[in-house]
Image: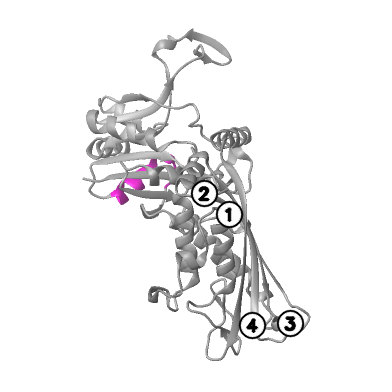
């Protein structure tokens, strides 16, 4: 029986004071929620993921999560957090274990997820958290009512995990009674079921206020300590030929000729691939996708870009940004630049703000100016964790 993770990305994040939901804020050059998705994607105890978001964000979240193979569905949430979890439970289907996580907790680790799931499988319900280190007092109207026994107090977080029948029973009882709790373990406690406490990391913070984003950045930087940032460059040239479509950045640009090549000859996507592979010391486009292989005949270069992104993730490499320039005398490319940037960003699983595409002529000089062909070049910045750097060196990669 499967384990399904419900990841909540439906909050408005009003306390952040931002112009977008907090789970989509930039953290280290990526949308914040992608870090939680990475952890669940990497956790072998999780089989599938259901993302719950606001109805007006479904398409955007589905695009953002397309890089994660375990994402089963993206569904609309409800008015309250508890309602959103209930929608995720409906979408989970027939499973053994359901785990719930707030998408605004980006620093969770795969091993912590696995520990909570194991505890829930053994005991029915489990939650990650930490024993209180501060003295805890109960207050009312600005006055202390009592001092609680610190040895009995925990600060709980997510993920929280449950046997599927336990969390379903708890939610059904809460809905019947009109009860709303601050988390799902509160609903399970109401029906008399035990909840096991699993000690986790204090890094597993929830981004709620502006200062929390700074803390998350500090944690991310600390985790990257011992890693490296790297720059790669790509350059490519293709002839213009009759009877070919002109494809640039996955966009079919109206023109009387197209670029010649074994694939779709998308010179823009090719230089982005080469820049990224070079930055990560993973070779070049010809090594990964040789033009002697019939499997790549006429293939979309965006597919090759997606496969490049997979290779980067396997090497623990994160894309910072890509800056590319296409050199073409004709046609005018400006009307298509935005879509090119969006296509490249989607293929790489990054935000479109991390991709810049420019176009220029050569003032009718050289083979580009004579309209014999087109050229492109790109520069990419990537970050590689210490773990990824070591694994890359073990494969023979060089800095």
Q: Which residues are magenta?
A: 78-92
Q: CA distance from mark 3 to mark 2?
A: 37 Å
Q: CA distance from mark 2 to mark 4?
A: 33 Å
Mark with earlier residue (4, 1): 1
Of tags 2 and 1, the one toward the viewer is 1
> Mark 2 Cα within 10 Å, few/some/many (few <14, many 20+)?
many
Mark with earlier residue (1, 3): 1
Mark with earlier residue (4, 3): 3
Please say whether residue 233 is visible from this viewpoint. Answer: yes
Marking on residue 366 = 3
213 vs 76: above or below: above
Residue 84 in the magenta stretch? The answer is yes
**The N terminus - image quarter:** top left
In the rendered structure, are the residues bearing label 2 and label 1 in contact, judged by CB atoms less than 8 Å apart?
yes
Asked where in the image residue 42 lies, by quadrant, the reply is top left
Q: Which residue is mark 1?
A: 279
Q: Is residue 323 left or right of residue 131?
A: right
**Helix, strand or loop for disc 4:** strand
Residue drawn at (52%, 80%) of the image: 261
Please say whether residue 177 is visible from this viewpoint. Answer: no
Q: CA distance from mark 1 to mark 3?
A: 29 Å
Marking on residue 373 = 4
Q: Position of residue 360 (x, y in %)?
A: 73, 74
């Amino acid at each position: 029986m499967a384990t399904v993770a419900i990841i909540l990305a439906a909050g408005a994040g009003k306390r952040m004071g931002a112009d977008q939901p907090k789970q989509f804020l930039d953290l280290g050059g990526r949308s914040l929620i992608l870090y939680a998705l990475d952890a669940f994607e990497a956790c072998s105890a999780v089989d599938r993921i259901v993302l719950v978001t606001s109805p007006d964000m479904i398409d955007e979240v589905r695009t953002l999560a397309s890089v994660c193979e375990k994402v089963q569905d993206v569904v609309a949430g409800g008015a309250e957090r508890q309602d959103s979890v209930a929608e995720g439970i409906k979408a989970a289907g027939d499973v053994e274990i359901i785990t719930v996580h707030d998408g605004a907790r980006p620093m969770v680790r795969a091993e912590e997820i696995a520990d909570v799931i194991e505890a829930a499988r053994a005991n029915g319900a489990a939650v990650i958290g930490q024993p209180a280190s501060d003295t805890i007092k109960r207050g009312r109207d600005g006055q202390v009512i009592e001092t609680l026994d610190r040895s009995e107090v925990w600060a709980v977080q997510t993920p929280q995990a449950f046997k599927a029948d336990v969390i379903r029973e708890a939610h059904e009882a809460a809905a019947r009674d009109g009860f709303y709790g601050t988390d799902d373990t509160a609903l399970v406690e109401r029906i008399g079921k035990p909840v096991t406490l699993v000690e986790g990391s204090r890094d597993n913070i929830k981004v709620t206020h502006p200062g929390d984003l700074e803390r998350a950045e500090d944690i991310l930087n600390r985790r990257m300590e011992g890693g490296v940032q790297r720059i790669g460059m790509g350059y490519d040239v293709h002839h213009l030929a009759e009877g070919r479509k002109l494809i640039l950045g996955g966009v079919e640009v109206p023109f009387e000729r197209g670029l010649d090549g074994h694939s779709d000859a998308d010179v823009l996507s090719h230089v982005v691939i080469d820049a990224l592979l070079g930055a990560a010391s993973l070779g070049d486009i010809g090594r990964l996708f040789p033009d002697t292989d019939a499997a790549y005949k006429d293939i979309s270069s965006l597919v090759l870009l997606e496969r490049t992104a997979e290779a980067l993730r396997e090497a623990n490499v994160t894309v910072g940004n890509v800056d590319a320039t296409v050199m073409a005398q004709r046609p005018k490319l400006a009307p298509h630049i935005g879509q090119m940037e969006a296509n490249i960003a989607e293929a790489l699983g990054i935000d479109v703000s991390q991709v810049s595409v420019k176009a220029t002529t050569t003032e009718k000089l050289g083979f580009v100016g004579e309209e014999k062909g087109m050229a492109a070049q790109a520069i990419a910045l990537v970050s590689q964790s210490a773990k990824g750097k070591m694994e890359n060196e073990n494969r023979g990669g060089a800095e």
